[in-house]
Amino acid sequence: MRSLLFVPGDDARKIGKGLACAADALILDLEDAVAPARKAAARDLCRRTLENADTPKRLFVRVNALDSGGIQSDLDAVGAARPCGIVLPKCRSGADVAELARRLDVVEAAAGIAPGSIRILPIVTETALSLFGLGSYSQPVSPRLCGMMWGGEDLAADLGALANRDASGAYTVPYQLARALCLIGAAAAGVVPVDSVYTDFRDHAGLQTEAALGLRDGFSAKAAIHPDQIEPIHAAFTPSAADVAHAIRVVSAFAASDGAGVVAMDGRMLDRPHHRGALRVLGRARAAGITLPDSVVSLLEHA
């Protein structure tokens, strides 16, 4: 999963465009994109979309925050329609994930859905307090936890900032910190780190640069707010043929090494971090739909 596209949960036209675009996942938004008076209509439209969509995309629903008073109505409306996952905004710590997991246990039981089917993807940096909880997701929170996404727009509002980027377009220090802590927290929890949205949807060059920096630092995917952003995101997060070929050689060398911690290749000594890096490249390639040799797929499945 390289791209996750937010679409307003009350806009059938935009949902249709999202379903038709190349995004790997769609996030049907019941929170910020929907006015209070439209919440009930949005829940109904999201439920019908989940029930009727014929798509290989992963379909998530962003519900309202735990303290909003609206989350239970969201879950009651869409839970039985079997979304791939729930995106939890304003998530303060792993305790919030555990609370949502308990609610999903009840929803799944009532709907006759296999326990644990609905995953949880929290947005973990939207309040000042949340930054102090980013180490808590590595505790035994819930097996439903599938990733961690960071966001800078709500955080800027919570901090009272005038802007979260400088004149060059780079994030200022508080948001660099939030981004880094999300990445590190996700790595510690063993889940997918998701980079935040790039709000200038017309600036494809800036988006591709930021996506490439995200990949460099360790993010596995990036959120989007417009279908036109998907192609630049995929260009950044899809490994090149040369990268895939090199990674196959690395994992094959280690597989043939009889458990050695270091192997020689092309005049270089490669150790286990190189092996883990190659496995990540091949994992991204597989997620992007790139066909890998059966022997390599087997190595990935047993890594």
Image (cartoon, helix red, strand yellow):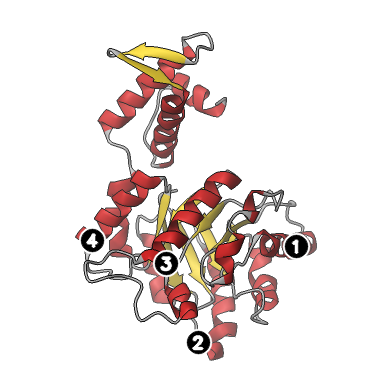
Nearer to me, 60 or 128 = 128
Residue 206 numbered mark, or none: 4
Residue shown at 70% from the left, 52% from the top: 142
Q: Position of residue 234 (x, y in %)?
A: 32, 50
Residue 137 visible at all = yes
Q: Earlier in the sequence, mark 4 or mark 2?
A: 2
Is the residue 107 above or below the residue 41 in the image? above
Residue 66 placement, left or right of 158: right
What kind of element bears circle 3? helix
Nearer to me, 66 or 186 = 186
Q: In the image, what residue type sits under mark 1?
A: Ala
Distance (Cα) linking label 4 and label 2:
30 Å
Residue 262: which quarter of the image? top left
Distance (Cα) linking label 1 and label 2:
28 Å
Q: Position of residue 50 (x, y in %)?
A: 56, 64
Residue 186 placement, left or right of 199: right
Query: Closer to the observer: label 1 or label 2?
Result: 2
Residue 35 numbered mark, or none: 2
Query: Closer to the observer: label 4 or label 3?
Result: 3
Q: Earlier in the sequence, mark 3 or mark 2?
A: 2
Query: Closer to the observer: label 4 or label 1?
Result: 4
Distance (Cα) linking label 3 and label 2:
29 Å
Residue shown at 61% from the left, 61% from the top: 133
Residue 111 numbered mark, or none: 1
